[in-house]
Image (cartoon, rainbow, N blue to C red):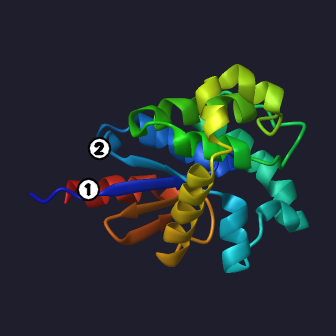
Amino acid sequence: MTTKRVEFFFDVVSPYSYIAAVQVARSPLLANAEWRPFFLGGVFKATGNQAPMHVPAKAQYMVKDLARLFAYYDARFQFPAVFPTNSITAMRALTAAPADQVKDLALKLFDAYWGLGRNIGDAAVLAELLPAELLAAAADEAVKEKLKTNTDAAVSRGAFGAPSLFVDDELYFGEDRVFLIEHALKK
C-alpha cells in the first residue's frame, strides 16, 4: 500500500474552508494531512475567479447553505458582521506557525470568525487569539514570501478557490469533496 500525500490549502476567511477543516480534523483517514495556509485573495487575483458573494443569487443562497452545512457538521455558526475581512495577517501568522500547530490554530481562528462572528481582520482580536511571536513573525518578509509561495504553488497546480485539497497531485475543490478524498485514500 502506497502512502498518499494530502495537502489542505485554506484561508480562514472562507466559510467553505471551515467546513472542510472540520471534516479533515475529524477524519482518521486525514490525520496526516498537511494544513497549508494560502491567501484566497491572491488565488482569486491569479485565476480571475471571484467570491460567491459577488454574484447576488449565490450570495443570497450562501447564507442558507452555510447554516445547513454548519448544522449538519455540528459546528457553531454566526455569520460575521465584517465579511469578507482582510485575512492576510492571520494567514501570515499561520504560515509562520510550526507545522504541528497550524491545524489547532487554524481551527481556533475559524471558530472565532465563523463560529462567534469575531473579526479576525482586527489586530486586537488576533492578539487575543494568536501568540504574540506569530503575529510579530507575520510582518517578516520571509513569512510573507512563504505565504505567497504557498498561494502560487496551489494556483500552479490548478487551485482556483478555497478550500483546495490535493491527494498527491490530484486537485479536489470544495468542502463537499472530502468524502472523495477519503475514498481515494482507502484504495
Could you say which is closer to the camera, residue 23 or residue 133? 133
Image location of residue 9, percent across then percent down: 51, 55
Q: 149 or 47: nearer the eye? A: 149
- Which residue ends up furthest to the front in the rendered image? 141
Q: Where the N terminus falls, by quadrant? A: bottom left
- The spot of residue 6 in percent (x, y) is 34, 55
Query: Could you say which is closer to the camera, residue 70 or residue 95?
Result: 95
Q: Amino acid at mark 1?
A: Leu
Q: Residues within 10 Å of mark 1 (few under 14, many from 20)?
A: some
Q: Earlier along the polypeptide chain: callout 2 or callout 1?
A: 2
Whole-percent x, y for residue 153 in the image: 49, 69
How many neighbours does mark 2 have within 10 angstroms: few (below 14), some (14-19), or many (20 or more)?
Answer: some
Q: Is residue 163 visible?
A: no
Callout 2: SS = helix
Q: How many marks?
A: 2
* Rendered position, 17 above or below 181: above
- One can see residue 26 in this view: yes
Vertical arrangement, residue 27 with respect to residue 159, above or below: above
> Would you identify the image quadrant in which residue 66 lies?
top right
* Numbered disc 1: secondary structure: helix
Q: Are marks 2 and 1 in contact (CB under 8 Å)?
A: yes
Q: Compared with residue 181, is residue 105 higher up or lower down, i.e. above or below? A: above
What residue is disc 1 on? 185
In three-dimensional space, the C-alpha distance between marks 2 and 1, rounded to whole angstroms, equals 7 Å
Amino acid type assigned to the residue bearing label 2 in the image: Leu
- Residue 109's quadrant in the figure? top right
Q: Residue at x 82, y 46 (%)?
A: 85
Residue corresponding to mark 2? 29
22 left or right of 68? Answer: left
**71 or 32, which is in the foreground?**
32
